[in-house]
Image (tube, grey):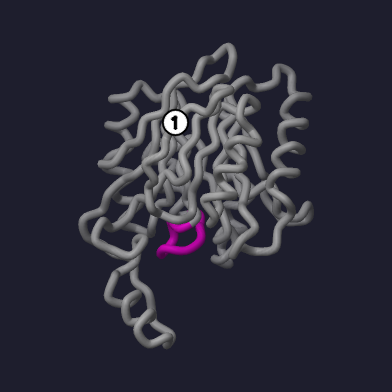
Amino acid sequence: MNILFIGDVIGSPGREKIADCLPGLKERYGIGLTVVNGENAAGGIGIVKKAADEIFSAGADVITLGNHSFDKKEYAEIIEHPNVVRPANYPELVPGRGFTVAAGAAIVSLMGRFNMPSVDSPFSAADAVLKKLSSFSPSPKIIVVDFHAELTSEKAAMGYYLDGRVSAVIGTHTHVQTADERVLPHGTGYITDAGMVGGLNSVIGVEKGAVIKKFLTGMPVRFEVEKEDIVINGVVLRVDDETGRCEHIERIKK
């Protein structure tokens, strides 16, 4: 199976870029499963039903979330959708689900613990999810993990912790695409951050002038999503259907 994973979609400009580019990317790479991180899809922060519907309509099979999962009060309209996945290491009483199965593959969301909401250990949560998946009949061979985290060290550690147990560990959250895509020694595809769908000439998708002013003054500033020169970042994975091992990972930037 060829799997397309798209990094954090930033606001309506990001959603428009997804609608424009996703069909062509899926055709070009012969994609069987498309996963999109949509936690910044509504106005640059959070998720609402309208934003999720647009991403699904563009061709996404699954939307993963992160630390902004519940930042919009309208999250309740979409969080229980079977193919919307919030981090599995939120406490048990939090609404939504931490993994789903689509096109025969499992998609898991995890969140780091540095500069993030208070959550359980992502490593323990990963073990718990894999145990649940092993009880499925049949249990999915292909497992893709979106690890939404700040620290590169935490992401690298998760990659090696799950190497050989999942098909891929794809980092998200920093909005800056890294150049370390590779297949780890035991067959897990890995990249520290898939990047974003947002403005090239921005500060992680936000209009740069406002961010610079914030750093210069320390005063509250209203951030606006950058609307020009939108790029789409992500990775394409080629995964063996029988073993679940990643055979190739390729970075995309369009």
Q: Which of 79 and 198 is in front in this view?
A: 198
**Which residue is denoted by mark 1 in the rendering?**
182
Please say if 220 is above or below 50.
Answer: below
Q: Is residue 138 covered in magenta?
A: no
Q: What element carries label 1?
A: strand
| Residue 21, x across and y down, in percent | 28, 39
Q: In the displayed structure, does residue 94 sit left or right of residue 187?
A: right
Residue 185 lies in what quarter of the image?
top right
Q: In the displayed structure, does residue 217 sit left or right of residue 153?
A: left
Q: Which residue is drawn at 41% across and 64% down?
A: 43
Q: Which of 178 and 96 is in front in this view?
A: 178
Residue 214 lies in what quarter of the image?
bottom left
Locate the C terminus by quadrant. top left
| Residue 57, x across and y down, in percent | 40, 41
| Residue 29, x across and y down, in percent | 33, 24
- Residue range (magenta): 40-49
| Residue 161, x across and y down, in percent | 65, 36
Q: Which residue is drawn at 45% across and 56% down?
A: 174
Q: Residue at x 38, y 57 (%)?
A: 10
Residue 236 lies in what quarter of the image?
top left
Q: Residue furthest top?
A: 242
Q: Main secondary structure of the magenta part?
A: loop
